[in-house]
Each structure stands twice: as C-alpha cells, then as structure tokens.
Amino acid sequence: MKRALFILGVTVLCWAANAGEREVRLERPWGTLSGTLTRPDEAGDAVALLIAGSGPTDRDGNSRAAGMALNTYYLLARQLEADGIASLRYDKRKIGNSPDTTPEEALRLNDYIDDAAAWVAWLRAEGFGRVVLVGHSEGALIALEVAADDPAVAGVVTLAGPGYPMDELLQLQLGNQLVGYDPGLLLRANAIISSLRQGKTVAEVPPALQGLFSASIQPFLISSMRYDPRLTIRRVRVPVLIVNGDNDLQVVPANADALAAAQPAARKTIVPGMTHVLKSCDERDLQGQLRAVYYNANLPLSPELGPLLRDFIDGLATPPAPQR
C-alpha cells in the first residue's frame, strides 16, 4: 500500500557550516522529529538513513531508560563519514529530542514506517540522489517496508534484522533465555504471545514480563506481529545487503538466512564475532555480552562492518527521480 507522504515544514539548525554535522528537524502531523545530518567535506550524492532498533533507543544508539551506553549509530555515522558517505540519524517519536504527547498505547509500527518514509522525502529535497536505508534490528523491518513502497530508494541494508514475524522471534528469544531458567514463565510468555498474535490484549502479566508485555506496549506488539519480513523483502526491488553477526544472541543468523531465502537477489554476509549491537565480543552468553559490550560506549564497531557498508553503498546506482 502506498503511503501518502507530506512534510508540514522543516526547521534546520546548523552546527557547522558546509561540512560536518548539523541538527535538523522534521515537522510531522503529531509533532517534531529531530536528527543529526552528517555530511563529509567530499560527500557525493549518497546518504544513509540510519533507522534505530526497538525500545527507547535514541539517535546515537543509546538507551537512557535502560542505562545502556553503546553509541552504535554515532559510530556508524563516524565510519560512514570517514568513507565519504553522508548520514542522517534521528530520535524516534517520544525519544530524545522528538517529544510526542500521543499516548504510548496509541503507537503502532506503521507510525515508525511513515516517519522513516518522511525522512526519505526530506533527504531527496536536500539534494541527495541516492538515499540508502540502513536499518538495525526492528529498524531493518522498517527499512524494508519503506523500500517496498518506494522504488526510488537506492538500496537497503539490514543490520541484525528479523527474518521472522515478531511473535515467532519473541518465542525464539524467550525460549533461549527461559527454557533452562524458568519453564513456567516461558509457558506464560508463549500464552501471552499467542493471544497478542490473535489481536487480543492480556490483562494479567507476570511482574517478570511487565517490561516486555506491559498494557501500554501490547497494542504496538500486536501491530508488529502483522508484518512478516520474508513477505516484505520479496516486494523490495532495489539492492539489499543483509548483515548479521555470528555472535548475535538476540537475532540469530538464521534470521539472515530466512531473509536471503525469501529474496535470492540480496547479498548476505555473516560477520564473525559480531553481536547484536554491531560490536565484536568473545563472550557467547547473554550475561557475558551485557558485561563486555552493552555498557561500553567506547568499544568500536566490528571492523568488517565499515567496509561492507562502504562497498555496498558505493556500488549503488542513482535511481530515477520519483514520479510526482
């Protein structure tokens, strides 16, 4: 389904003249999205739109609510800048400098998709000929959805993106975490997931699962479960690069395999040692990774990631201008 795109207005606050970074704002019907546009001195016509993953994750890849300092998207922007590629990273609605008074229970995944599509239109208006969608985790599904409806996008990169619907992914994730820890809690979680998959909210949620299935989040989860990344990627007609790490415990490499099987024209790379947050780690259990990676903003990105993105983006052709 084609989505109507409209931009009510744009306010730009410059941090630096000509090159470097500047704060940008995009007015939406519900409020204002804020982002950071990074533009190297010798940038060409390509720009990467960095789309964040799930939860209260800001434009830099940090979660103040969870106390996690990762700087993943900030580091991605720096890497792209070093390779002569512009980027835009932004705070999702209700996060950071993108305040939104809409109740949390009214938020749907489609809202995030529409916001990303609006940024694509804004970047084209800025003069970028090649807009490349780089989505991480849930952001990868958002990127694929936008590209499926917009053939003038130059390409898509999915970073640790889901290859299965949300309900199946949650069951896999919780199964890995709870099967040996609390089988009873796992059964309760699966029952909640089954109900949400049918579009039914659940009134009683165990305290240990409140962070994942709170009443205000359930409508968003229901909306997310209606998307199957395998069906979405089949509709994408632009080049796609699928990247996962073989040490990703949240979105395991089988997700990349599922995406690649659904879209044989896509390129797939599994990066050795890379975790879900795009940084390398020797730890092979979740607690070990939390200690070593998830609270270390100074840890660099996996060294293979930068060249993968650079080579893919540099090889993309400029698509025809979208028809008005």
Image (tube, helix red, strand yellow):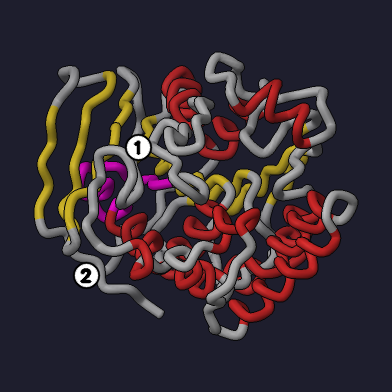
Please tell me which residue is depicted at 28% across the width and 19% down the height of the picture: 20
Q: Is residue 57 left or right of residue 322?
A: right
Q: Is residue 57 above or below residue 182?
A: above
Q: Which of these two is toward me, 103 or 292? A: 103
Q: What's drawn in magenta, residue-wise?
A: 119-132
Q: Which of these two is toward me, 301 or 296? A: 296
Residue 291 location in percent, x, y?
69, 23
Residue 298 falls inside the magenta stretch: no
- Quarter of the image with the C terminus is bottom left
Residue 63 location in percent, x, y?
46, 35
Q: Is residue 131 left or right of residue 215?
A: left
Residue 79 location in percent, x, y?
50, 22
Disc 2: which residue = 324
Locate residue 17: give its quadrant: top left
Disc 1: which residue = 88
- Frontmost of labels 2 and 1 is 1
Please tell me which residue is depicted at 60% across the width and 18% down the height of the picture: 300
Task: Give the number of callouts.
Answer: 2
Locate residue 39: give its quadrant: top left
Tag 1, which secondary structure?
strand
Q: In this view, does 215 lie above or below 281?
A: below
